[in-house]
Amino acid sequence: MRLQSYLAGRWQSGTGAGRPLVNATTGVEIARADVTGLDIRGALDHAREKGGAALRAMTFAQRGALLKAVADALQARRDEYGAIARENSGNTAADASVDIDGGIFTLKTYARLGQLLGDTTRILEPGQEQLARDPVFFARHVWATRPGVSVQINAFNFPSWGMWEKVAQATLAGVPSLAKPAVATALLSEAMVRDVVAARVVPDGVLSLVCGSGEGLVEALGPMDSVAFTGSSATAMVLRIQVAGMAAAPRLTVEADSVNATILGPDVKPGQAVFDLALREAVKALSVKAGQLCTNIRRILVPAEIEQEFTGALAAMVSALRVGDPADESTRVGPLINVAQREEALRNIDRLSAETKVVAQAVLPDVAESSGFVAPTLLRCAEPASGSAVHELEVFGPCATVLAYRDLTEAIVLATKAEGSLALSLFSEDAGVQARAVAELGPWHGRLMLVDGEVGKAHTGHAIVMPQCVHGGPGRAGGGEELGGLRGLRFHMQRSAVQGGPRMLATIAEHAAEQAL
Ligand code: NAP
């Protein structure tokens, strides 16, 4: 099977040999993807001219309705996607749901935001500034859609959610999307876009898809275009350098990897509900999507005086994790997506061995040599304050490390050693501990999840990105910001100060939604 790209309103195949996609459980090749010889520049022009014009002619409410129609088209074919995610990504049914239902939910959330903004096409910030002594000259800030194209380069671990969360924001803002999923897991992205195209719910040029290499994409961009990248810090660096050298200066936002932490508060004792809640969340880090989540807990910070109890309980849970065929309903942990990812994860676990010891490992059943399976592995770092690899290395698989801390000050210092992360969770009943964590760790994180006994199991999870909340993180995590409800539109719109008389500004305010972004 050869994956195709959807460019300039047509499904097209590259002429090269292409790169393989495999069955994660068996390692057997299932498809190839290639874009050799395809006219990417022409596709970008088509998206800008046809798709951009179509979207800009629609109001926010109409774009919201379009997103709802996309979500409905995907929902109608939902059952077929689970099998693809199982085959190509090694997802269990629960893993697949995070990616597939997460994508559909995000589309529906942005569809509702479109209804909120109503039949308008611009966003007007509340309030105006008087700029002259007499009340005849004022300024207001207006957000207008940039007439460009949004190039969206995605990581392999979310072929559905990663694509749709970017498409949702760009479409609502009025900007056409050219999505480029990672080749290794593009089977699901291709199937979903095929279904949306077949449902005829999206105007020509609004949605394009590249199944193949993304090289050359960025250099074809102009001043109104943008790149939203999700992936490794290494690729992010290549793109940053590329964009920095371009006179056209397209916008770039980066969601990169991070070594996220969870903290069990210094106030917590075994037997308390938060203790068990933290255990439950920690074991998810070694099981859900086989640990292949960018927001995943990689470091588990535990008070030294209860570390033994906590690590002992967690070790028992990790050892009991059932690893195996994702098609089997009793399987909790499936394979990584391919051998290359397995080898990378094992290499990084090995690199951590200078600073850590293995405290528990789940049993790996007999698996194909060319499969992606990695045994869930719990590590312990005895000297976290002097460790460096444990704070720097992201094992992109089912592995996390327990680090004991003496007091909250040390826990905060350890958490920041990752130099900026996507998400941090804190399990604590103490309001003072919570307040300090927010004040001192907020600047280092894009999202903080605070859990006490009252929140209980109602929380959405450390690793789960909610479209209503900011996704992204400072420093090492890339410095980008996506989602966060309407704020996600900022990236695709231009903020201008409009200066003029009161009547002029009143006219400008027509067809604009007053909204703080
Ligand atoms: P990756 O190797 O950096 O690849 C990411 C994407 O960039 C792929 O689509 C890749 O295409 C493309 N790419 C590579 N070189 C390119 C170039 N020169 N020009 C244009 N595109 C290029 O990352 P990955 O292995 O797919 O993903 C795993 C990493 O992503 C992990 O480190 C994880 O933490 C991170 N991640 C972060 C987030 C977040 O939201 N912060 C979410 C998910 C994952 P090909 O597939 O064709 O190589």
Image: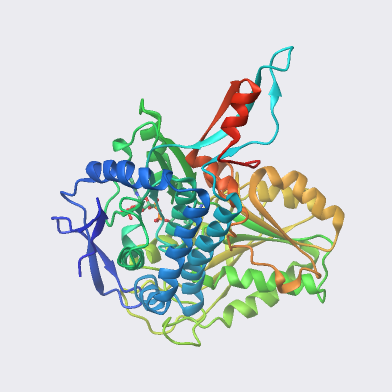
On screen, 205 above or below 22? Answer: above
Q: Nearer the viewer, residue 34 or 515?
A: 515
Q: Nearer the viewer, residue 380 or 442?
A: 442
Examine the rendering and report whether any part of residue 187 can be seen: yes
Q: Residue at x 65, y 70 (%)?
A: 281
Q: In which quadrant is the N terminus drawn?
A: bottom left
Q: Is residue 95 left or right of residue 20?
A: right
Q: In the rendering, at what x and y percent does residue 343 appear? A: 38, 64
Q: In the rendering, at what x and y percent does residue 303 appear? A: 77, 61
Query: Where on the picture, by quarter, is residue 23?
Result: bottom left
Q: In the rendering, at what x and y percent does residue 61 appear? A: 52, 53
Q: In the rendering, at what x and y percent does residue 34 appear? A: 21, 56
- The coloring applied to the image is rainbow
On screen, 217 above or below 115? Answer: above
Q: Residue at x 35, y 74 (%)?
A: 84
Examine the rendering and report whether any part of residue 407 can be seen: no
Q: Residue at x 65, y 24 (%)?
A: 502
On screen, 272 above or below 413? Answer: below
| Count of marks, rendered view | 0
**Which residue of the protein is positioned furthest toward the left in this rendering?**
15
